[in-house]
Structure formats: structure tokens, C-alpha cells
């Protein structure tokens, strides 16, 4: 049975072209530096985002945590938003792996106030930790894209204080698509950037961490420490090359389908959708006024060939991706209408 899977864009499967590329990939032991396909991916990815070098990592969380480990000393403080992925969904790894303290700021739908960032940078004092890093996220995991002016202002403040900026760019190419800019227009405001090859780009495994050559040299040893030294990884790199060369060009389709989904959901009585917040492929909505239990909805949808997650903090999230069509969206919306109408 084919399922319509709206739980996340992490559920995407590799395309036929990726499978063919993986099958034919030339590989070697990447820890020894012998994998030609991985070398090609790392060179291509670095140039794509305007950095000197890049490194393949198993996941986005791995890449973010490796960045913290590489930038910071143990006991450093990291400034970042209280709603960002590193804080909310990375299992407290920063305290375990890098041994850093997170100083969280309240964001405005993902955007940090530059002046508050500046105010939270630690002065030199025997009692204080050092501010070792500032982390931004774009596109944000709330589905919004952060304005480049905001990133630029924070980057300028960081430069003034000689503090590096790391960008969690898990959905970096979604952000570039929304802004209609070359991806380097975003990454020029950070010293390191992590971006995923999976999610909307459909590669089966992997993310990239990019930055200066010196930073990546140190990160490579940190990757080995964290257990991320892979062997014949070129099979994965082959899919990653297809992801970056081709799949980045079609993300607008997912965004348009998300807008279609949001608009149709907003027509259902009792469902509240903030259409202005649909920047990429994520639709958040509140259906509490319908009186329909979201845990029950998960089961009823599954029986009808639709996979979703229950509400988190009172909000439902549907995510479009390469394998979700406009026809699928019509079926999802009509199914939801029917269930609400016929609820006991």
C-alpha cells in the first residue's frame, strides 16, 4: 500500500537516479582519504556554499554538535534561540559532547534580536564563561525563513567581538528558494554551516558541515572522535551529489504544495492556519476548536493511507516533500473534512 507521508520531509526515499548513482559509485576507504566520490561531494558542497572546505557527516544533529565541539572550548557559552533545533530536538547533546553552556534568547518566530545578542556576549571576568559561539538557524524549524538583514546584523556584531557564527542550515536550500537568492547570499553571514542532503533533497543519509579549511581539518578529527569516520562512504556521497546538483532546483514545488495545503486547511471550520508563516514546505495549524482528538486522527488517517504525527505543543504539522503531490493534498484535506464531519 502506498502511504501519503506528511510526518516530515525526513521520510523521503532516494530517487531512481540516486539509486543508479549509488550502484555505480566508485568508492574507497574515506577515513584514509581514498574515496573519490566522497572527495567530489565535499569539494562540490564547499564551493556551492562559498566555503573553503566541507565534511560529510551522518546527520544534521551530528553536524551541529560537531560544529559546537570544533568551535568551542569546554565551558564556553553558546548564544542561540530558545526555539532552535539545537536546543529543542538534539537531546541535550551540547552538554554531553562539547561540554558547553547554552544561553538561550527568546526569538521572534525564529529571528533573534541583534541588540539582545550583543547584550548577552560575555565581558572578560573571572566569574564568567567565555562566549564561544553564536548559532543561527535558517530556514528555521518552525517553517519560517529568517531575513538576511537580521543575519547580517548579528554577523557584524559577532565579527566585532571575534566570535564565530554557526548556521544550522538543515533546510538551507529551502531558505534560498524562498528568498530567491543564491545560497551563498545566506552562508556569507556565517563561519560554518551545516546543511542536510536528506529531507527535501531525498538523499538517504547524510549532511554536510562547511567552513574554513582549518576548521574542517579540526572537525574531521572531531568526527572520528564522535564515531563518524565512515569507510566506503562514496555510495552515500553519490546520492548526495544528485541531491545538491538536481534536487535543490525543485524545492519550489514543495513550497507551492504547502501553500495549497495551508489554504485548503484554513477553509475547514475550526482550523486555524497562519498562512503568512508558510515560507517553505511546513504547515502548522491549530485544530483544537474542531473538537477532534489528534491522537485519534493519527490512527484514522493511517487507516486511510496517510501518515501524520500528533500535535506538539497544541499544533499539528504537515510537511510536503518530493513524494507528495497536489492530488495527495486534495485527498488529505477531503479525508480530514469527512472525519470532522462524521466524528462521534
Image: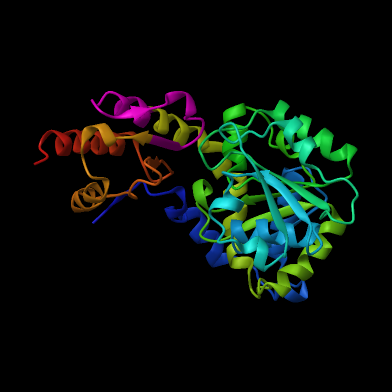
Q: Quadrant of residue 237?
A: bottom right
The image shows residue 240 at horizontal and vertical percentages of: 60, 55
- The stretch drawn in magenta includes residue 270: yes
Residue 57 shows in the view: no
The image shows residue 309 at horizontal and vertical percentages of: 34, 50
| Residue shown at 64% from the left, 73% from the top | 232
| Residue shown at 83% from the left, 33% from the top | 156
| Residue shown at 71% from the left, 50% from the top | 45
- Front-most of 166 and 6? 166
Q: Quadrant of residue 62?
A: bottom right
**Placement of the C terminus among the 4 image quadrants:** top left
Q: Is residue 213 left or right of residue 185?
A: right
Q: Is residue 269 left or right of residue 243?
A: left
Numbered disc total: 0
- The stretch drawn in magenta includes residue 129: no
Q: Is residue 8 left or right of residue 224?
A: left
Position of residue 71 relative to residue 276, above or below, is below
- Front-most of 35 and 159? 159
- Front-most of 251 and 238? 251
Residue 250 shows in the view: yes
The image shows residue 47 at horizontal and vertical percentages of: 77, 46
Point out the stretch of residues depicted in magenta: 260-284
Q: Is residue 314 left or right of residue 248?
A: left
Q: Quadrant of residue 111?
A: top right
**Placement of the N terminus among the 4 image quadrants:** bottom left
- Its colouring scheme is rainbow
The image shows residue 272 at horizontal and vertical percentages of: 34, 28
Amino acid at each position: 500500500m502506498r502511504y501519503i507521508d506528511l510526518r516530515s520531509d525526513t521520510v523521503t526515499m532516494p530517487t531512481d537516479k540516486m539509486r543508479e548513482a549509488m550502484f555505480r559509485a566508485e568508492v574507497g576507504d574515506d577515513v584514509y582519504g581514498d574515496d573519490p566520490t566522497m572527495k567530489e561531494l565535499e569539494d562540490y558542497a564547499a564551493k556551492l556554499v562559498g566555503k573553503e572546505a566541507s565534511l560529510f557527516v551522518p546527520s544534521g544533529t551530528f553536524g551541529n554538535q560537531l560544529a559546537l565541539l570544533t568551535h568551542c572550548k569546554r565551558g564556553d557559552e553558546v548564544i542561540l534561540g530558545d526555539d532552535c533545533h539545537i536546543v529543542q530536538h538534539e537531546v541535550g547533546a551540547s552538554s554531553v559532547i562539547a561540554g558547553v553552556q547554552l544561553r538561550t534568547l527568546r526569538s521572534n518566530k525564529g529571528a533573534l534580536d541583534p541588540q539582545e545578542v550583543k547584550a548577552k556576549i560575555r565581558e572578560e571576568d573571572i566569574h564568567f564563561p567565555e562566549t564561544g559561539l553564536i548559532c543561527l538557524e535558517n530556514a528555521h524549524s518552525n517553517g519560517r525563513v529568517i531575513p538576511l538583514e537580521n543575519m547580517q546584523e548579528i554577523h557584524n556584531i559577532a565579527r566585532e567581538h571575534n566570535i564565530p557564527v554557526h548556521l544550522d542550515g538543515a533546510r538551507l536550500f529551502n531558505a534560498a528558494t524562498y528568498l530567491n537568492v543564491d545560497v551563498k547570499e545566506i552562508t556569507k553571514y556565517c563561519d560554518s554551516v551545516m546543511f542536510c542532503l536528506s529531507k527535501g533533497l531525498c538523499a538517504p543519509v547524510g549532511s554536510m558541515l562547511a567552513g574554513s579549511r582549518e576548521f574542517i581539518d579540526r572537525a574531521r578529527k572531531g568526527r572520528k572522535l564522535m564515531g563518524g569516520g565512515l569507510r566506503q562512504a562514496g555510495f552515500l556521497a553519490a546520492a548526495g551529489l544528485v541531491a545538491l546538483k538536481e534536487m535543490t532546483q525543485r524545492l519550489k514545488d514543495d513550497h507551492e504544495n504547502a501553500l495549497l495545503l495551508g489554504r485548503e486547511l484554513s477553509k475547514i471550520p475550526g482550523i486555524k492556519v497562519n498562512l503568512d508563516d508558510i515560507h517553505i514546505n511546513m504547515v502548522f495549524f491549530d485544530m483544537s476548536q474542531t473538537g477532534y482528538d489528534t491522537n485519534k486522527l493519527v490512527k484514522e488517517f493511517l487507516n486511510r493511507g496517510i501518515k501524520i504525527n500528533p500535535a506538539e505543543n497544541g499544533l499539528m504539522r504537515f510537511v510536503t516533500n518530493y513524494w507528495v503531490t497536489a492530488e495527495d493534498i486534495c485527498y488529505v484535506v477531503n479525508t480530514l473534512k469527512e472525519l470532522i464531519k462524521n466524528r462521534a
